Amino acid sequence: MADSQDVQDLVGDSFKWLELVKPLEPGVIPGSNESLKQARRLLTRKNATMSEFSYALVEDTKRRVTDKNPIVACASIHRVRAYYGKVKLFFGKPELIATDPEYRNRGLVRKLLYEMIHRI
């Protein structure tokens, strides 16, 4: 719960190029993606499919002393209920996977998915 603001900022900043309605002027970098920043509500206890325990995070502890977001990668698991005939199934699907652009191509998401979420 204490990291919910940092997770929200990471997700919004990681996907700032998505859903751009109008073309940008050359050299203009868009701001944070506000629609994806709503992910913070998924970290509250008021959500039926996720909780604060449904997230795996990678934190760069050296960034805590700077003004930069210390959370550099995240992945969450979304709890899903389904039926196959009369058989009730529960499974999880990865959601809200994000990596800070400075930390991409280092295998952080692969590590999160394989070592933390895949084992659930």
Image: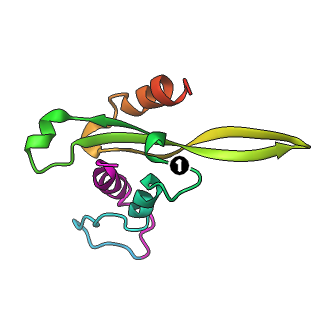
Report the residue at 41% width, 69% height from top. Answer: 20
Identify the residue shown where x is 37% and y is 28%. 107
Query: For the view shown, which residue lies furthest in the right direction?
Result: 85
Quadrant of the rendered image containing residue 5: bottom left
Quadrant that contains the C terminus:
top right
Q: Position of residue 91 (x, y in %)?
A: 67, 38
Decide whether residue 46 is among the magenta residues.
no
Q: Residue furthest left?
A: 65
Please tell me which residue is depicted at 43% across the width and 46% down the height of the picture: 52
Above or below residue 117? Residue 39 is: below
Quadrant housing residue 9: bottom left
Residue for point 59% across, 54% down:
48
Q: Position of residue 84 (x, y in %)?
A: 86, 41
Relative depth, front residue between 60 and 4: 4
Span shown in magenta: 1-21
Q: Amino acid at mark 1?
A: Met
Tell me if mark 1 has few (under 14), some (14-19) or many (20+) residues whose alpha carbon lies within 10 angstroms of its own.
many
Q: Nearer the viewer, residue 32 or 60?
A: 60
Q: Quadrant of residue 98?
A: top left
Q: Where residue 96 sits: x, y (%)?
A: 47, 49
4 in the magenta segment = yes
Up/down of 44 relative to 107, above or below = below
Q: Is residue 53 left or right of residue 103?
A: right
Q: State whether residue 84 is above or below residue 46.
A: above
Where in the figure is residue 117, as x and y percent of width and height? 51, 31
User: Which residue is denoted by mark 1 in the rendering?
Assistant: 50
